[in-house]
Image (cartoon, grey):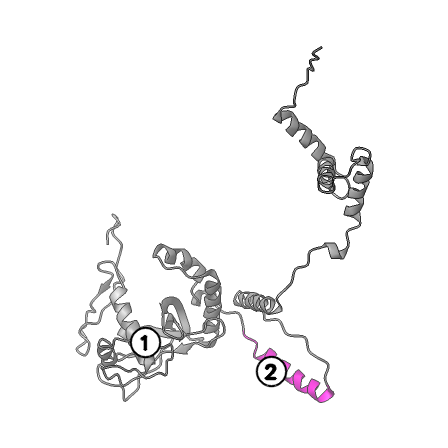
Amino acid sequence: HIVLYNHRLPSNMEFEQAKSFLSQHVDDNGTSIYSHMAAISRKIVEEKPENAYELFENLSLQVKQSKLNMTNDDIPRININEQEKQEIQTNMQSILVSCGRKPEKKPKEPKGDDEEDAEQEEEEEENEAEQEPIDVTKSANILEYQQLLQYAGICIDYEESYLLQNAFTRLIRKFGEIENSRFWGKIQAINNDYWIVEAKLSEYPEAAEDKPPKVEEPGKGINEFVYFVITNIENGEWIKLNDVTPEQVKKSRQVYRLFTGDLTAKVGGQTHFEWTETELLRAQIARISSSTILSPADYYQKPEEEDEENPFIIELNEEFAPNEDGGI
């Protein structure tokens, strides 16, 4: 005799509907009926008991108890590198300080009366010398420049961007005479790279009486802008470069060598450069700036009264207006 069974396997849609229904019913711990049945099935496959059908209720109870009886030993441990943790906290603190947050003070250890009095005096001096928030309009916004730099094919790491922004804050705090500033660029060197900022001052110092001939005064011509340089943007100190002279620019054209990253280093080579790497760097900045600056036509004009000492001097054209068709 042949017996035919009218048995139809469930379709994928029916299975998904059943799975969705079983997943909706959960207990207080967030375990659904579907996940519980899956855990029981996994336990049966792994342990392979002989009487799985008879032990099904006991296996279900064991699965429930295993979730309730979880100890600290069952929780995976994560090993924390204290040095990396300290570095991350330091970087986060630097970022918060650059955004205007006051630096956190370290907890103090209990000390004697004399030491407490000395520390109290130091705290009072620190409170008196507490720095006010900087004027953000004087500092360049590095994060806004990030996309523009990428368009030009220049990529600065985001961590370096935050550190550079924090370095800008330190620069504005140290040199209050800065009126506005911008990130000029970075010059790679052998030991330390030079991070350079171009700034305009609200007040320039008077020219020295014994200045060499044909040297432009501070705030004019090739010395219109002041340049600051730093080699360690994380916690280094900004250094103000001196004004450049025509003789230094002329000599720098004959120098072919890599920068060392040390401003006090002597400049060697076939050409005798009597100054240090500081003056060579300032001269190269002047040459690069003069060769890469573009301006629309008629944006500058010659002054009405010609200067006999400097016949090449130009000034901004206050009546300048861009062309309506967008041409330059």
Quadrant (top left, top right, bottom left, bottom right) of the C terminus: bottom left
Viewer-proximal residue among 206 and 55: 55
Q: Amino acid at mark 1?
A: Leu
At 46% from the left edge and 63% from the top edge, which residue is drawn?
A: 161
Quadrant (top left, top right, bottom left, bottom right) of the N terminus: top right
- The vertical placement of 117 against 62, above or below, is below
| Image mark for residue 218 | none
Q: Is 252 situated left or right of 41 in this image?
A: left
Pick whichever of labels 2 and 1 is earlier in the sequence.
2
- In the image, which residues are magenta? 112-131
Residue 81 position by quadrant? bottom right
Residue 302 is situated, as x and y percent measured from the top left of the image, at 20, 67
Mainly helix, strand or loop, the magenta region? helix
Q: Residue furthest front?
A: 1
Say if residue 220 shows up in the picture: no
At 30% from the left edge and 72% from the top edge, which residue is drawn?
A: 285
Q: Is 323 situated left or right of 129 in this image?
A: left
Residue that badge 2 annotates:
125
Residue 259 is situated, as x and y percent measured from the top left of the image, at 33, 75
Q: Are marks 2 and 1 in contact (CB under 8 Å)?
A: no
Residue that badge 1 annotates:
281
- The vertical placement of 193 against 114, above or below, is above
Residue 113 is situated, as x and y percent measured from the top left of the image, at 73, 87
Viewer-proximal residue among 221 and 152: 152
Q: Is 82 one of the magenta-colored residues?
A: no
Q: Is 57 situated left or right of 194 in this image?
A: right
Q: Amino acid at mark 2?
A: Glu
- The vertical placement of 10 against 204, above or below, is above
Q: CA distance from mark 2 to mark 1?
A: 39 Å
Viewer-proximal residue among 257 and 154: 257
Viewer-proximal residue among 211 and 256: 256
- The vertical placement of 6 against 133, above or below, is above
